[in-house]
Image (cartoon, rainbow, N blue to C red):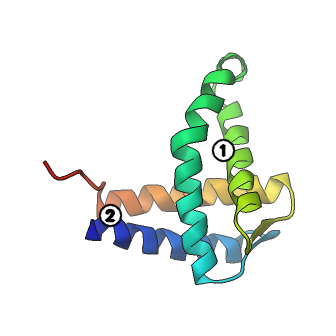
Amino acid sequence: MLLGIVKWIILALALILVAKITPGMEISGFMAALISVAVIALVNTFIRPIVMFLALPINIVTLGLFAFVINALLFALAAFLVPGFSLDGFFPALIGSLLFSLFSLLVNMVVGRTRAAT
């Protein structure tokens, strides 16, 4: 559980860094970043699988490149849902989602995945 909280805090800091790098993306503060990371995780857990399944034909035709568009749209959805997290269009959402995905991958590689206690 402690490892999950540490990852959550690191990802919130990463989201703040991504907002500083990406033009057109703003995070109002650390609390907004924490809430944003939680909302992104919930969107990716519950909504992303459904959208990926529905978009499977176009994803096959585009050889998986449409997944980037889906990620950007879901990232924008999270920004829409969280006060203090804003995007100024599609391209900031695309760049922000790509950078946040890279930071998330790095955090998971360094910190490791959380596992349920058995």
The nearer-to-camera label among 1 and 2 is 1
Q: Amino acid at mark 2?
A: Val
Q: Most extreme residue toward the left, as rendered?
A: 118
**Element at badge 1?**
helix
Q: Is residue 116 left or right of residue 101?
A: left
Badge 1, how many Cα within 10 Å: few under 14, some, many 20+?
many
Taking the spot 68% from the left edge, 53% from the top edge, the residue there is: 75
User: Whole-percent x and y of residue 7?
Assistant: 39, 67
Q: Which residue is mark 2?
A: 110
Taking the spot 52% from the left edge, 77% from the top edge, the residue there is: 13
Q: Which residue is mark 1?
A: 71
Q: Amino acid at mark 1?
A: Asn
Marks 1,2: beta carbons within 8 A: no
- Of pointers 1 and 2, the one earlier in the residue sequence: 1
Closest to the observer, 38 or 106: 38
Q: Determine whether 63 is above or below 80 in the image.
A: above
Image quarter (top left, top right, bottom left or bottom right) of the N terminus: bottom left
User: Whole-percent x and y of residue 30?
Assistant: 58, 82
Badge 2, how many Cα within 10 Å: few under 14, some, many 20+?
few
Closest to the observer, 40 or 19: 40
| Mark drawn on residue 25 | none
Q: Which image quarter: residue 66?
A: top right
Taking the spot 35% from the left edge, 73% from the top edge, the residue there is: 6
Q: CA distance from mark 1 to mark 2?
A: 23 Å
Closest to the observer, 117 or 21: 117
Q: Which image quarter: residue 37?
A: bottom right
Q: Is residue 56 left or right of residue 80?
A: left
Q: Is residue 1 left or right of residue 102?
A: left
